[in-house]
Image (cartoon, grey):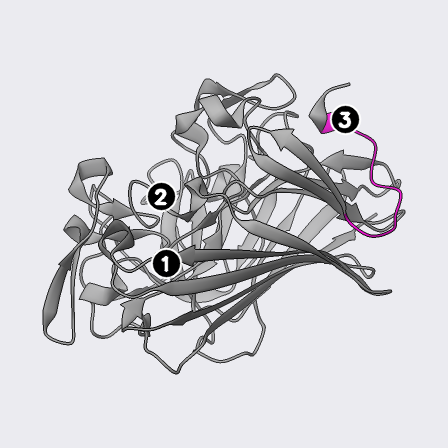
Amino acid sequence: MTPSSRPPFTGGPPVCHTGTDAGQRWTFGFPGGLTAEVHTRGARLHGLWVPDRHGTPADVVLAPRDPARTAAARYFGATVGRYANRIARGRFSLDGKTYQLTTQENGHCLHGGDDGFDTRLWEAESVHTPEWTGVLLHLRSPDGDQGFPGNLDVTVSCLIGRDGELSFSYAAVTDAATLVNLTNHAYFNLEGEGAGDILDHQLAVHADHYTPVDEELIPYGDHRPVTGTAFDLRRPLRIAEAQARPGAGGGYDHNFVLSPHGNDDTLRRAAVLHAPSTGRRMEVLTTEPGLQVYTAGQFDGTILGKSGTPYRTGAGIALETQHFPDSPNRPGDPSTVLRPGEEYRSRTVLRFSTSG
C-alpha cells in the first residue's frame, strides 16, 4: 500500500511512529474527517487526507517518495524560516548594523538560508481534546544561525478540528532584535496527490494589490493594483485560464497583498481553492498580510512523489501565508522585526468543505 493510499486515522490521541529518516512521524485526526501526517524533520505536513463529496478520503498534499534523498523537494510541506521567501542578496540592516545571511539561488537568501528550519529536527508533543487533536513542535535557533541575530525559540502547533479545519499557529521569542517570518510550504492538489495537475482547480485570492518582481523574483517599486492585470483573482477563476493571461508568465510565483491586512490576531480570508471534479474546497484564513501563490511552474518530473508519480508542471499549488518578500529592505512594508520582550504570533487556518 502506498503512503498516498494509507487508510485514514481511526481516532483517538495522536500516534507517534519513530525510526524514519524524517525523525518522528505523527498521525492524527477524527473519524470521518481530516487526517494528517506530520514529520518532525522540518516540522512538515507530509500528508492530509480529506473526504470528497462522496465521503471518500484522498491525500491532497504533495511529498517526495524519499524525503531524505530529494534535496530539490526540501520545502515540501515544511515550516520555513527564520524568514520565509526572499531577502535580496541575503543582506539587511537592523538598528544600524548590517547582517549577511547565507544565500542560495542567484545569491539571495531563500526561506531562511542554506540550512533553514526545514532541515532541522524539531521536538514534538501531542495535543488532544474533544474538539482538537494534533502536535506542538518546538525549535531553538541559536544566535548567528544562518547569519540572523538573537537566540530564537519557536513553537508551531498543527491541529485538526472536529469541524474540518487544519490550523497552524506560530509563536516565537528572542533575546535580541531579529527578523521573523514563518509559514508552511505545503503543495496541494484537491483531486489527490499524484492525480495530475491543478489546472482545472478554481482559485480566488482576496487581494487588491500584488508585488511586482524582477527576473530573480526580487520585489521592485510599489505594490500595484491587480485591476486589469493577470493578478486579479478576486473572483474564482480556473487556474489554467488565470495563468494564461498576459503578464502571468505561464504561472504564478508572486506575493498578493491581502485585503484588508494588518499585524493583529484577526483571521481574514486570503484565498479559496476548489476542485470541481471532487467537490473539495479549501478556504485559507490568516492573520498574515500576504499570500505567496506558487503554481509549481518549475516542476519538471524529476521529483518522484510518494505515490510513485513524477511531479510535473502544475502538479500542486502552494498558498503560503506570510509577510512580504524582502520587506526588511522595503521600509513601506509591514515590519518583520521581533525584539526582546515581544512575542511573534501568527495563525493560518485551512477550512475544508465539499460542494455537490
Residue 119: x percent and y percent?
43, 40
Picture quadrant where residue 56 is located: top right
Q: In the visual, does 173 lie left or right of 132?
A: left
Q: In the visual, does 226 lie left or right of 353?
A: left
Mark 2 or 1: the one toward you: 2
Residue 104: x percent and y percent?
24, 38
The span shown in magenta is 4-14
Residue at image mark 3: 5
Residue 80: x percent and y percent?
43, 50
Query: For mark 2, does the 10 Å Cα neighbourhood hold few (<14), some (14 to 19), or many (20 or more) residues?
Result: some
Q: Are the residues at dot 2 and dot 3 in contact (C-beta closer than 8 Å)?
A: no
Element on which disc 3 rests: helix
Query: For mark 1, does the 10 Å Cα neighbourhood hold few (<14), some (14 to 19), or many (20 or more) residues?
Result: few
Q: Label 1 amino acid?
A: Gly
Residue at image mark 1: 228
Foreground residue, 76 or 218? Answer: 76
Foreground residue, 154 or 53? Answer: 154
